[in-house]
Amino acid sequence: MGELYLVGMGPGDLPGLTLRAREALEKAGVVIGYSTYIKLLEEMGLLGGKEVVRKGMTEELDRAEEALERALAGQRVALVSGGDPGIYGMAAPVLELMEEQGFRRADGGMGLPGRFALGEKNLVLEVIPGVTAANAVASLLGSPLSHDTCLISLSDLLTPWPLIERRLHAAGMGDFVVVLYNPQSKRRDWQLRRSAEILLAFRPKETPAALVKSAYRKRQEVTLTTLEGLLSAEAGMLTTVVIGNQQSRFFEGTFLTPRGYGLKYHLETGEPLPGETPGLSLRRRDA
């Protein structure tokens, strides 16, 4: 019986790789992934003695299909994703393909890890989490995601742009901190500006924003700006953009979104503010 590990690589540096991810890569006989991720793993020295299969940017289904075929043939396979496999990663295409091909649960369990069968062949599937771009970027900025946050990809390769726009409007109405994945590419050079225009209808132009390129990699760049600044900002596929909510602010070179303690307690004394009680719901205030 083969084994298929969907491995989250984290931001792409060795310290950012979880111990479980390293264990899975060590156990695997075959490692499959996007060529850039394979190169990063090679630089970490983790692919010695393994069969390596490199695939291109838009070949996610090919990667998923080959990984399943090899695992059904009895091999131990690691299919790698940048960040986390379940966040714009390889977990979804693998499960979608398994559903389409007619895989059935073979162990009677729920969730993962789990054993699945296709005809007479079996494999064990495990999803191994990784540090996603939002988490990596947040750690470099300080604490921008300390309150309700949404992640939105600006790539329209698999999601129609009108739907992306509706989600941006909803995020603006809800005053969510917004993390933008895939903000720009050579072909898509206007979506970031359009996203900023939409959010400017809901929050001030001075709202803190940041662009982080290649977090925890050799060419890392961190830029602090504002929501208005994003109208003319340059970004790429290696950049993640963070846009604060109406309470977010910069503090001594860091990006801070308050958790809300200042609405309930005097921060210096720790005493509840008038009308507030520890452990009870916050008194209703005008939005």
Image (tube, rainbow, N blue to C red):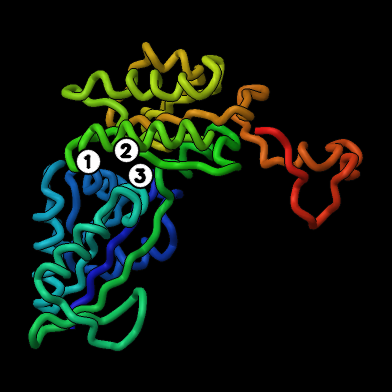
Q: Tell which tag, 2 or 1, sits nearer the viewer.
A: 1
Task: Answer with the quarter of the image where residue 161 lies.
Answer: top left
Crowd around label 3: few <14 · some 14–19 · many ≥20 (10 Å): many
Residue at position x 53%, y 34% from top?
Answer: 175
The residue singled out by tag 2 in the image is 153
* Residue 218 is at least partly visible in this image: no
Q: Is residue 118 left or right of residue 256?
A: left
In the rendered image, residue 26, in percent from the top left (x then y), is placed at: 30, 66
Do labels 3 and 2 touch, CB within 8 Å? no
Crowd around label 1: few <14 · some 14–19 · many ≥20 (10 Å): few
Task: Label 2, secondary structure: give it.
Answer: strand
Q: Nearer the viewer, residue 83 or 203?
A: 203
Task: Label 1, secondary structure: give it.
Answer: loop
Do labels 2 and 1 touch, CB within 8 Å? yes
Tell me the distance, in whole angstroms, between the alpha carbons under discs 2 and 1.
9 Å
94 lies above or below 165: below
Location of the N terminus (image quadrant): bottom left
Question: What's under tag 1, amino acid-wise?
Answer: Thr
Q: Earlier in the sequence, mark 2 or mark 1?
A: 2
The residue singled out by tag 3 in the image is 12
Residue at position x 88%, y 44% from top?
Answer: 275
Q: Earlier in the sequence, mark 3 or mark 1?
A: 3
Crowd around label 2: few <14 · some 14–19 · many ≥20 (10 Å): some
Residue at position x 67%, y 41% from top?
Answer: 259
Q: Tell which tag, 3 or 2, sits nearer the viewer.
A: 2
Question: What's under tag 3, amino acid-wise?
Answer: Gly
Tell me the distance, in whole angstroms, between the alpha carbons under discs 3 and 2.
19 Å
Q: Is residue 114 left or right of residue 130?
A: left
